[in-house]
Amino acid sequence: MNVTARRGAPRRDEPSARDRLIATATELFYQDGIRAIGIDTVLAKSGVAKSTLYRNFGSKDELIAAVAAEQDRRFWQWWDHIEQANARSPRMVVEALFIGIVELISRPTFRGCPFINVAIEFPDRTHPGTAVACANKQTVRQRLRELSTAMGARNPARLGDQLALLMDGAYGQAVTIGTSNLREDLLSAVAKLIDGESDHD
Amino acid sequence: MNVTARRGAPRRDEPSARDRLIATATELFYQDGIRAIGIDTVLAKSGVAKSTLYRNFGSKDELIAAVAAEQDRRFWQWWDHIEQANARSPRMVVEALFIGIVELISRPTFRGCPFINVAIEFPDRTHPGTAVACANKQTVRQRLRELSTAMGARNPARLGDQLALLMDGAYGQAVTIGTSNLREDLLSAVAKLIDGESDHD
DNA sequence: CTATAATCAGACAGACCGGTACCTTTATAG
DNA sequence: CTATAAAGGTACCGGTCTGTCTGATTATAG
């Protein structure tokens, strides 16, 4: 019960029930697990009526998908911001991305990669949420391949995929054994992988 | 209902109800997700009575922990076998481990690392199953550090942790984008990481 | 002022959940 | 042969789950 809800249509300065649902569900699903959180909990914390949830999303699965889509949007916003801030050097972009990931992972609220999480909780790849998650990972891989090309790697597809491997590894480790030395380990590994694909090697 | 169960104590050549429960739960939990599978499904497929489950384990959480412990046991059995088969060269051990992981991951029934999965479904690290999972990852990291020491790495702790990062990355990727090129990507990354820590570098 | 669309409130349904209790059956050990 | 331990069968409990339905309320657009 975080929100004092009001009956009737929302004022123009108020967030819509849809937005409140996505915001609340994003946090609850991520912190406790999707299957662990019932819609009643989401409704209570967001102050939204059950009928409004089902009018907007039709099912819990579709709410899950909307949450995943919102996380995908935020993720690429974060990524694009880092790309723009380091536009002159693709290698700096890659390094900044990994530094950013270390910062995300080091937060006490970090609970793993939300895309991997939904894919694990809903292994059926046709699940609408899992479909969003898989698309996200595909795009990450492609973007890292493009950065590898820009870095002049001999085998950019390989380097990109290896960097993606490292990223997902960081997520997985954080869930089980935490983040000690993660920054140094990760950045040194990135450097070794990039240098191993450089032309002057 | 896979098993035709019989009333009364098991014959000596029959597996105990406990073993059947663990075997069935291991498969069902892994394929569909732990929270997605109710104990009634485990009971139906194993042919065990509900009272027997609770006499043996006390709760679903303890069954989850027993399943994780069994997977941990199998995992180290697999690992030790690879170490023994390549006892002369620690580098060959590492490469064989990664080749083995690629083979596991490439199987159609592969559904991610079971230890990461339980930690994601039950983020509370005091959960008995998650505790087993975290201990497994800790030991993997330590064993890879030992192998890195045996390989003569300049910074064995770092190399070991980086190899662990790569392993968990492979698990995460397999859940979302499959395994194309995984073998080459992974083995080449392992080589780059090891060579980057070698004395003759 | 009125029509409309968005919202909250709450009761309800039917399935499923983990867990308990009690009783019967059977293999084995002594 | 008998005691014991391990097991299956089944009914049941209270809680929770997703989802439906009906109705009252309110801001905004025209």
Image (cartoon, coloured by chain):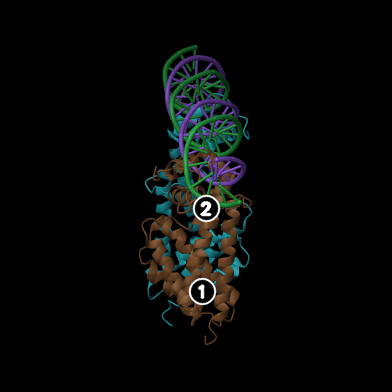
Chain colours: A brown, B cyan, C purple, D green
Find residue B79 and report its horizontal and vertical position in percent.
49, 58
Can you identify the residue that label 2 sits on?
A: A67
Q: Is residue B130 visible?
A: yes
Q: Which residue reaches farthest bottom?
A: A200
Seen at 45% across and 70% down, the residue is A98
Indicate the chain on which mark 2 is placed. A
Q: Residues within 10 Å of mark 1 (few under 14, many from 20)?
A: some
The image shows residue C7 at horizontal and vertical percentages of 50, 43
Residue at x 58%, y 48% (from the top left corner): A62
Q: Position of residue B123 (x, y in %)?
A: 42, 49
Quadrant of the rendering where the N terminus of chain A is positioned: top left
Pair 2/1: label in front: 2
Relative depth, front residue between B160 and A199: A199
- Report the amino acid beneath label 2: Val
Mark 2 secondary-structure assignment: helix
Q: Decide which of A78, B10 is in the foreground and name it.
A: A78
Chain for disc number 1: B
Q: Eyeballing the image, is C7 above or below A182?
A: above
Q: Nearer the viewer, residue C5 or A169?
A: C5
Which residue corresponds to the image point at 42% horizontal and 74% vertical from the top-left? A188
- Residue wearing tag 1: B191
What numbered label is drawn on residue A78?
none
The amino acid type, in three-letter code, at marker 1 is: Ala
Front in this rendered view, residue B32 or A130: A130
Residue A22 image point, x, y percent: 50, 51
| Residue A38 shows in this picture | no
Q: Is residue B106 left or right of residue B190?
A: right
Q: Give the answer, above or below, for where C13 lies relative to A56.
A: above
Side of A111 relative to B97 (left or right): left
Q: Secondary structure at mark 1?
A: helix
Q: Is residue A4 above or below residue B137?
A: above
Per the model, the C-alpha gap separating discs 2 and 1 is 39 Å
